[in-house]
Amino acid sequence: MISNISIKKLLLIIFLSANVFQATTSCFFARKYRVQVVNRLPSNNSSLFLHCASGDDELGKRTIYAGQTFEWAFCASGFSKTLFFCHLWWGSKDRAFEVFNSKHSINDCRSFLCSWSAMSDGIYYQDGQNGELLDKRYNWN
């Protein structure tokens, strides 16, 4: 006969194993955020060069063309110190800025999708794909 203690130990092992498996496939005690950079530049001069990184993750240099998107995901909580930045170049214009900073983005990015759009007159932010209207945040340098 199996004792109550053995059943409790078995259930604890199953519970912990499930949580370890979940932690390797999703965020554990954190939220999954996505950041995207969208090229909404005129199609006649559409190459947008970008470099995005954090202190822990080097996302590399990319080229995206008119209508294309570069996107990545990561886990962050209110206790984390997550900071991602991007540097964008379009012809002779450029701009470097924070695309996610856990100090304020957790409140700004309520949909868990922080969307940045490069347009001919500057860089715009939108909370989610169908969320709030585009909000101009930066001019090109």
Image: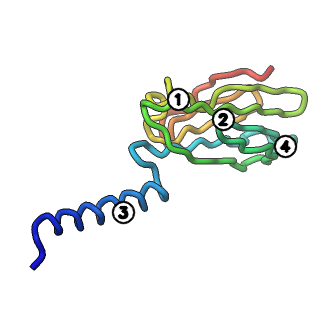
- Helix or strand or loop: what does disc 4 sit on? loop
Chain-order first, disc 4 or disc 2 = 4
Q: Quadrant of residue 139?
A: top right
Left/right placement of residue 79 relative to residue 92 reads left
Chain-order first, disc 3 or disc 4 = 3
Q: Residue furthest right?
A: 92
Gap in angstroms between the C-alphas marked 4 and 2: 23 Å
The residue that mark 3 highlights is 17
The residue that mark 1 highlights is 81
Q: Which mark is residue 47?
A: 4
- Helix or strand or loop: what does disc 3 sit on? helix
Residue at 67 percent of width and 31 percent of height: 85
The residue that mark 2 highlights is 54
Viewer-nearest residue: 49 or 26: 26
Left/right placement of residue 86 relative to residue 79 reads right
Where residue 13 appears, as percent x and y from the top left, is 29, 63
Left/right placement of residue 78 relative to residue 42 reads left
Where residue 138 appears, as percent x and y from the top left, is 68, 22
Q: Nearer the viewer, mark 1 or mark 3?
A: 3
The amino acid at mark 1 is: Lys
- Quarter of the N terminus within the rendering: bottom left
Q: Are marks 3 and 4 in contact (CB under 8 Å)?
A: no
